[in-house]
Amino acid sequence: MRTPSLSILCVASLACLVNSFARAGNPNEPVVVGQAIVRADSAKQLAKTITVLSQTFTGVAVLDSIEGRPIYLLSYGLAANQSLADVDAAITTLRAQGTIAWGELNYIGQTGEGQTDSLWLSGVGISEQAFESQYAVPLLGVTQAHERSRGAGVIVAVIDTGIDAAHPALEGRVSTKGVSFVPQSSSFADIGDGVDNDNDGLTDEQVGHGTFVAGLIHLVAPDAMLLSVRVLDSEGIAGNFQIARALAWSIDHGAHIANMSLGETYHSQALEDIVGEAKVKGVVVIGAAGNSNTNDPRQFPACDQSAVGVAALDWDDIKAPFSNFQINIALSAPGHSEFTKVGPNLAHCIVGPVPNGMYAVWSGTSFATAFASGTAALVRAQHPEWPSAATPLEEIRSTLTDTLGSTGAPIYALNPKFVDFLGASRISAVNAVAVGPIAPLIADVNADGNVDAADLSLILALWGTLGAATRADIDASGEVNAADLSLLIAHW
């Protein structure tokens, strides 16, 4: 991993990694050259797609697919006289003819901090104590909120650069069931490869992002379990297909909340499909608004109608100078840090864990998103009965978002230039949990308010169950086993 620099900004370029393709409303979007995504709803449609594209391009084949969904990643090669526009035109024709439901190039998504070249800062004085006492804790009322909920029973997928599960700040709340969608790497830890993959003069500059995000979620919801879904490489970059696949995996592996502190200005159909599926299945997708201080172009998935977009504010509830703002944004949360000529003012900083047991300061809508995900986990934990007749699966996202929005602090008197563009309010953890019941504790498998023989009976009855999203799988490992029994005994 790189040594953090005391400089917060650096100049970066993706030019050597990707090409650009201008499309209406989305100029110069970066893509993974040689890859396209299609939705073909039958084997016949897929075969015809490959046949048609092979008449124009070389090397057309299926590289990958999203498990359980008819979404495929295709390869293609370009001749000297061909361009990305030719690929896009061919895909558009296939869609118009009804051969495929939709198709698109494999555009690039990345962390908002990577888009604006923001690095974390570590050094003397940035410690565990600074992490636990940072300004967001009293601002959100985190300590008081824990009297009613700590997030037990909720699984939060951190779709990011991975998580350093050994970091002491995470206290063993990272599931052993993580996954990596980063090519040539099976590890779901937050690690670098020691290579400047995007040729910007920096090596592994976004290593630590996933751990930092996970730490903030854990700070707010310490009893929630975190799934490390590593999709962004150590530069903070991934293709749309991989990001959509990572979200689909999270849905399939029991996540209640998917934290997506990443984004892109291309409105991907692949990602929109999976975000829509998440909503229908009761999984709440929370995305970062972006760090370009603009409302156009929008960032996705934050601005997807089925997701929950989060903007960043400072310690006084003023819009962070970098935060995007948009009518589609649902909520705001703390995300800004103050830097002076002599270093960070820790009283006004977002502090989080980074690999190798260190702590750092960072700014970005990624971290506002993490605070929102943690608060959402507190509220979700108060409702183990969901889905219910009153709150069916497809209404969990709107119900939870409405709760966070209606109980938050008003912000528009302080931000008159951004009325309706920063969401309903700045979230308040203490107010959000005040409107719901006291949440069950860890190991309260039947959610009756006690950890006792009834919970033991449920664990034994479900012993060996694989893959099922059940409260008996206390450690969210994907199996009800001895580890869950040990946790039950420890919390008896």
Image (cartoon, rainbow, N blue to C red):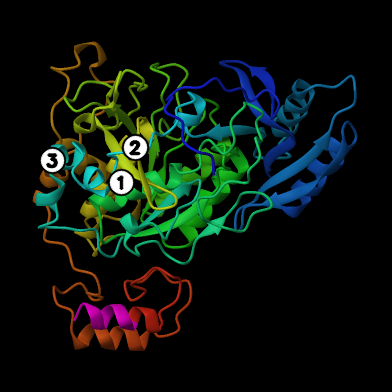
Q: Which range is magenta?
A: 485-492
Badge 1 element:
helix
Task: Please identify the quarter of the rendering in which residue 98 is found.
Answer: top right
Q: Which residue is the extreme one toward the top?
A: 417
The earlier-in-sequence mark between 1 and 2 is: 1
Q: Residues within 10 Å of mark 1 (few under 14, many from 20)?
A: many
Residue 189 coordinates in the image, percent (x, y): 51, 55
Number of marks present in the image shown:
3
Position of residue 462 in the picture relative to residue 417 (left or right): right
Residue drawn at x 18%, y 36% is 135
Badge 2 element:
helix
| Real-space Cα separation, disc 3 to disc 2, in angstroms | 16 Å
Report the residue marked by disc 2: 367
Position of residue 153 in the picture relative to residue 157 (left or right): left
Whether tag 1 and tag 2 are in contact, CB under 8 A, the answer is yes
| Kind of residue at badge 2 | Phe
Report the residue marked by disc 1: 216
Report the residue marked by disc 3: 138
The earlier-in-sequence mark between 3 and 1 is: 3
| Kind of residue at badge 1 | Leu
| Kind of residue at badge 3 | Pro
Residue drawn at x 25%, y 45% is 131
Q: Compare residues 95 and 332 and report the one nearer the observer.
A: 332
